[in-house]
Image (cartoon, grey):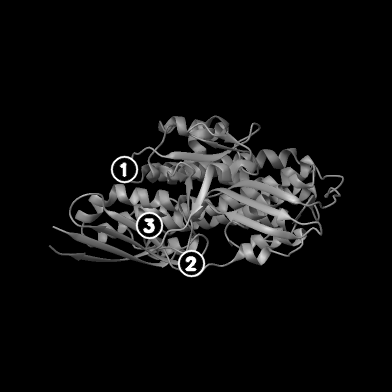
Amino acid sequence: MAKRVVVDTGPLARVEGEGSLVIESDGGGTPDVRLNIFEPPRFFEGLLRGRRVEEVPDMVSRICGICPVAYQISALNAFEELFGIEVDEQVRRLRRILYYGEWIESHALHIYMLAAPDFLRLPDVVTMAKRNPELVKKALVLKRLGNDLMSAVGGREVHPVSLKIGGMFRAPPKQAFDSLKSELEGLRGSVKEMVRFVDSLEKPSLNRESTLVCLRDPARYAIDRGEVTSSSGLHARPSAFEENFAELQVEYSNALHSRTVKGSSYMVGPLARYNLNFDQLHPVARGMAADLGFKPPVRDPFQSILVRALEVVHSIEEVAEEIGEYSEPAHCSTPYTTKPGTCFGVSEAPRGVLYHSYTVDGRGRVDRAKIVPPTAQNQARMEDDVRLLAPEILKAKPDEARRLAEMAVRNYDPCISCATHFLRLETKRGS
């Protein structure tokens, strides 16, 4: 019996866009899976050409309303490496606090409002709020914490305005974090409860091998910088990223697919970080993982929601320590002189490694820009996961087929808007 399943989406793209997922089988052989991204390109890399380097951090933050800090930090890392800038350690601490705020709000939204309805077999978060309003309230409280951290350091909750090449425009006084200390303390119990809730969810299973890629920082669980590391033994500086990973154009998508130079798909994001950097996870989060019997290796992408919950625990503990050790820097910014050259920067967005490369001319302007976001890197892996699940999807009833297909993509949290109402499923069956 030949079956064709067409999953026609609302918004989906590497940042914000439209696309569809098509699973097609003639009843034998490997099903054809296509994640079709048909949103027109946004041309951010082209828009950066000719811009002064000082403009770039604020411009790239506009690429994503959920991960603006990630885009800023990757850009800053690139330019500061090229210009030989040593940023004050207290400024780096502030940047990490800001970045953890982004992780907390992004993970909280994904866990409670985007993914939980899938696992609870509910159509959307509105229905979930009617049946269990406390879950949504907990999500909003956690998101509020993330927003407060971003406001305290970045000047506002979305698209922070405090970061600049060489440091920050201004640093908050230590007392600016006083109210956040009690907020962090009050949430420690609720985030542990969140981990137990996520662990209790009934999850599909998809145990498979995959090349995992993330950053590794000798000093800590990587977030703001690090070496590019993989489960296949890669240890490379950011400048070697394009020697190991390539972007490919596929005929059915306006979004590029990333693969290793050997041609295989790979995964970035929480599951990669958890497997490769588990030893650096905060002891409180590691202890909770041990209590649940949840230790690496974890290969199932449906378990990524639990990893995100543990990363929220990690983030809150790390932020509390960073705030405790913070003292206002004597100088917020390090003077520098621009120079021509090509530079490379990476950081760990909530969804995974975010790579930037820029070529700067003699006037301090961008001559070339390349940005590889996590969603683009995960697209081929998403297709592979759906392909492995296709036999189960194809034999399921339409509602269940849609749910499984949605979940397989939503495991990667490609973006907030597309994940909220991801798939509309039309099933056609024929002989």
How many residues crowd mark 2 within 10 Å: few (<14), some (14–19), many (20+)? Answer: some
For the point 70% across and 61% down, the residue is 58
Which is nearer the eye, 195 or 417? 417
Dot 1 or dot 2, earlier in sequence: 2
Label 1: few (<14), some (14–19) or many (≥20) C-alpha neighbours in 10 Å: few
For label 1, the residue is 205
The residue at which mark 3 appears reads as 117
> Toward which corner of the image does residue 314 lie, by quadrant?
top right
Q: Give SS at disc 1.
A: loop
Q: Which mark is residue 17?
A: 2
Disc 2 to disc 3, C-alpha distance: 22 Å
Q: Residue 59, labelled with which disc? A: none
Give how far across and how far down residue 183 sits, in percent. Answer: 63, 49
Nearest to the observer: residue 19 or residue 109: 19
Identity of the residue drawn at 63% across and 65% down:
46
Question: Compared to 7, does 261 lie above or below?
Answer: above
Front disc: 2 or 3 = 2
* Alpha carbon distance from label 3 to label 1: 17 Å
The residue closer to the viewer here, 234 or 111, is 234
Answer left or right for 195 relative to 96. Answer: left
Q: Amino acid at mark 1?
A: Ser
What amino acid type should be assigned to the residue bearing mark 3? Pro
Q: Nearer the viewer, residue 90 or 325?
A: 90
**Can you see residue 257?**
yes
Q: Amino acid at mark 2?
A: Gly
